[in-house]
Image: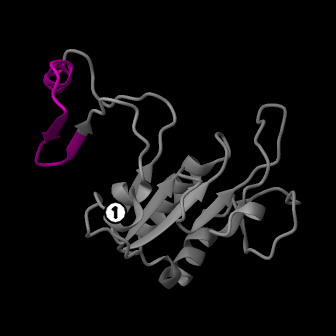
């Protein structure tokens, strides 16, 4: 399986880019999975549903499954820092590509999605100058905040980014095991 992270500040366009890349990779006959870091409290369950009631009663894990999909909800008794490698170990081994959104401090190879600040987007300083795991910068800014030798990908051209991913595919092969890289 190939694993590639997408890092950048909230609102930079990471989700939109990944959303555009998924069908382009699927058109190549590839199976794509996503691991996403959520900064805020989130819930995929709904109050009153059986699975919600099971969790509310104290179940540490609830798996909901049908012939079309499966979801695992795991409750942590205390706030828990998640290791991206442990999450990747949970991904179905049949995935050809795993696109990781967030986890900007991870040691995964990553593309930085960078946008220049605007009145409605605050952004932040570029990550690529200080992160040796960055493999490219995706941006539509005419100028980046700091010079770089990294490949520059046009954020508005997801088809070209998908072609770049496929051409560079061997460098994204993933072979780590969660127990080797997580505490």
Task: Indicate whether 43 appears above or below 71.
Answer: above
Q: Say if the magenta span includes residue 157.
A: no
Quarter of the image with the C terminus is bottom left
Q: Which of 58 and 118 is in front in this view?
A: 58
Kindly identify which residue carries mark 1.
Answer: 178
User: In this image, 112 relative to 147: left or right?
Assistant: left
Rendering colour mode: one colour
3 left or right, relative to 160: left
Which residue is located at x 68 percent, y 46 percent?
12
59 lies above or below 156: above
Q: Residue furthest front?
A: 183
The answer to whether 59 appears left or right of 16 in the picture is: left
Report helix, strand or loop for mark 1: helix
Say above or below: 115 vs 147: above
Residue 167 in the image: state x and y as whole percent.
55, 83
Q: 134 and 47: which one is in front?
A: 134
What's the magenta region? 49-72
User: Where does residue 11 sit, x and y in percent of width and height?
Assistant: 66, 40
Mark 1 crowdedness (10 Å alpha carbons): few <14, some 14-19, many ≥20:
some
- Does the segment drawn in magenta span residue 62? yes
- List x then y, in percent, for residue 65: 13, 42
Q: Residue at x 78, y 63 (%)?
A: 129
Q: Residue at x 41, y 64 (%)?
A: 181
Q: Which residue lies furthest to the top in this view?
A: 48
């Amino acid at each position: 399986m190939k694993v590639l992270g997408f890092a950048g500040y909230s609102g930079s366009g990471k989700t939109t880019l990944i959303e555009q890349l998924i069908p382009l990779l699927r058109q190549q006959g590839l199976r794509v999975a996503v691991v996403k870091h959520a900064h805020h409290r989130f819930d995929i369950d709904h109050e009153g549903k059986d699975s919600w009631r099971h969790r509310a009663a104290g179940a540490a894990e609830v798996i909901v499954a049908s012939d079309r999909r499966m979801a695992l909800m795991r409750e942590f008794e205390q706030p828990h820092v998640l290791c991206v490698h442990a999450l990747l170990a949970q991904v179905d081994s049949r995935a050809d590509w795993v696109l990781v959104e967030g986890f900007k401090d991870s040691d995964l190879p990553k593309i930085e999605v960078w946008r220049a600040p605007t009145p409605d987007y605050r952004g932040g300083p570029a990550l690529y100058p200080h992160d040796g795991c960055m493999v490219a910068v995706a941006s539509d800014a005419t100028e980046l905040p700091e010079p770089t030798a990294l490949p520059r990908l046009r954020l508005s051209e997801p088809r070209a980014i998908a072609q770049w991913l496929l051409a560079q595919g061997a460098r994204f092969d993933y072979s780590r095991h969660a127990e080797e890289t997580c505490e």
